[in-house]
Image (tube, rainbow, N blue to C red):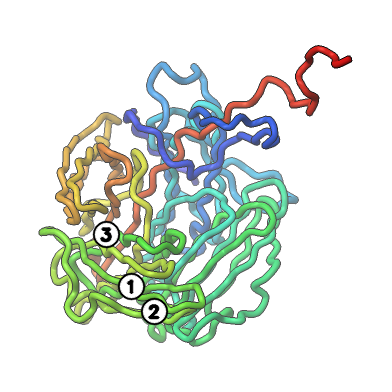
Amino acid sequence: MIRPVATALWVPVGVAAVLGIAAFVGPPESVVRERPGRDEPVVRSTLVCPYVGGEPRASSHIGVLPLGGAPGEEAAEPEPVDVQALTGPDEEPATLFSATAAGALTAAEVETDDASGYAVRAVGALAPGLAAEQTMAAPGPDLRGLVTGRCTGPAREHWFVGGSGEVGRRGRLVLSNPTSVPAVVDVSVWDESGPVDAPATQDIAVPARGQQILLLDALDPGAERIGVQVSASQGRVAAALEVRETDELAPQGVTFVPTAAAPSTDIVVPGVPAHGERTLRILAPGDTDAIVSLRLLGPEGPFSPVDQNVVTVTGGTVLEVPIGDGAGEVAVSVALESDEPVTAAVRVVDAPSDELPDLAYTAATEPLAGAAPALLGRAGSGLTTRLLLSTVGASAARVQVWTLAADGTVGEEQTVDVAGGSTVPVEVAAGDDPWVTVVVEPAEPGTVVVTREIVGSDDDGALLDLMPLVAPAVSVQVPEVAGELPTGLAPAGPIAR
């Protein structure tokens, strides 16, 4: 059963990082001039919502919001954004629902007992700034918790730092191929002891318009903490890592581990909340040990956790560093500087006394390159949605936050100034709409990182979700092409006699 919910908003956006899929195939290098190209709107975007449903008692939704374009700038009847199940190459995909206007949020409930991924496809006027999310609320008794995930575009490489192979901590690596041609993928795994020679992780075939699911406890049984790299050797895939935890028969939470930024010597893990058990996990995938300096970006600026300001990560391993005591009862982001490339994530567990816990992850994320939406926040019924904003440099940054009202207008607009190297929580007011939807835009691209936090409780225990924000692709750089193919002949001139 599909129950669309729509609101409308147009937000002026700047040029975003090219994170989606653009319908541009470059000319041969020989005909591209040695000069900068020009920015053109993205004309084709594809995102994948990897895993929705699969639990008879769970409530699952997908939301779609095309940010790009202003009223009057799009075609009178633009091509709709279609959400279609990934059913494999032999079935014609059925459309679950469609979004039909720029700046409008459309959300639909997905009522199914079978887990299924969905491709979100846009062509033309609604392709720029395409964003989508999926969410699931599971009440138990087998699976319990609140989870949201950003729907991502297919790419050649993905990184994750999260999950384990221990009993009761099941991680599902979901590989999705929304294209019409097969893809081939290699998966590399590291744990606390080093690189893992896992079975059947090379030359994995992912069928056209289909999925493959790998279990972490099968790839690395007994591992306490795991890092994963997904590399496509043929085609491109989307990847997601879902973690479900239990203690014997008692559910302990469910979450998506956000995609981590590729290993670098300078990264930031945004939006670590002010509560719960907070544990930093650092992956050093190379052969050389990494010496990593840690700083916490708190409300009063950066500070170093006592006795943990510098750690050494053995090459090829995942190191775990508790940071809850160092952070205290304030929200922070974690800045890491290393002499060798690393990537990282933070695992957060809210475990009230005598009640069931929930867990969430936040992961190393690039600073916002433009406007970024968060679509499926929640409020009421014991839940609160807030944004955790952090600057990534020593200079202050200004951020605009728009909250959508139930009638589709901007219900609230906030200008937030964030001091250099600090973190500011921003409460998001709930309106009459079922979802709390916000758009965040930095005044200067590359200055802030943002995480959406949903926190609260129900009759059984804690509820928690974290999702780092990423600006969707609005434009793509098109190189300037020469008017004709070079012939290789010398210019005409007088004939020597």
Residue that carries the numbered disc 2 in the rendered image: 313
Residue 69 picture location, percent across and down: 41, 26
In the displayed image of the protein, which residue is found farthest to the right? 497
Gap between marks 3 and 2 measured at Cα: 23 Å
Q: Which mark is residue 218?
A: none
199 or 350, which is in the foreground?
Answer: 199
Rendered residue at 65%/44% (across/down): 93
- Secondary structure, mark 3, is strand
**Picture mark count:** 3
Disc 1 residue type (three-letter) = Val
Gap between marks 1 and 2 measured at Cα: 7 Å
101 or 32, which is in the foreground?
Answer: 32
Are the residues at dot 1 and dot 2 in contact (C-beta closer than 8 Å)? yes
Mark before the other along the chain sequence, 1 or 2:
1
Mark before the other along the chain sequence, 3 or 2:
3
Residue that carries the numbered disc 1 in the rendered image: 292
| Left-right relation of 33 to 326 | right
Residue 280 picture location, percent across and down: 32, 73
Q: Which mark is residue 271?
A: 3
Up/down of 346 relative to 472, above or below: below
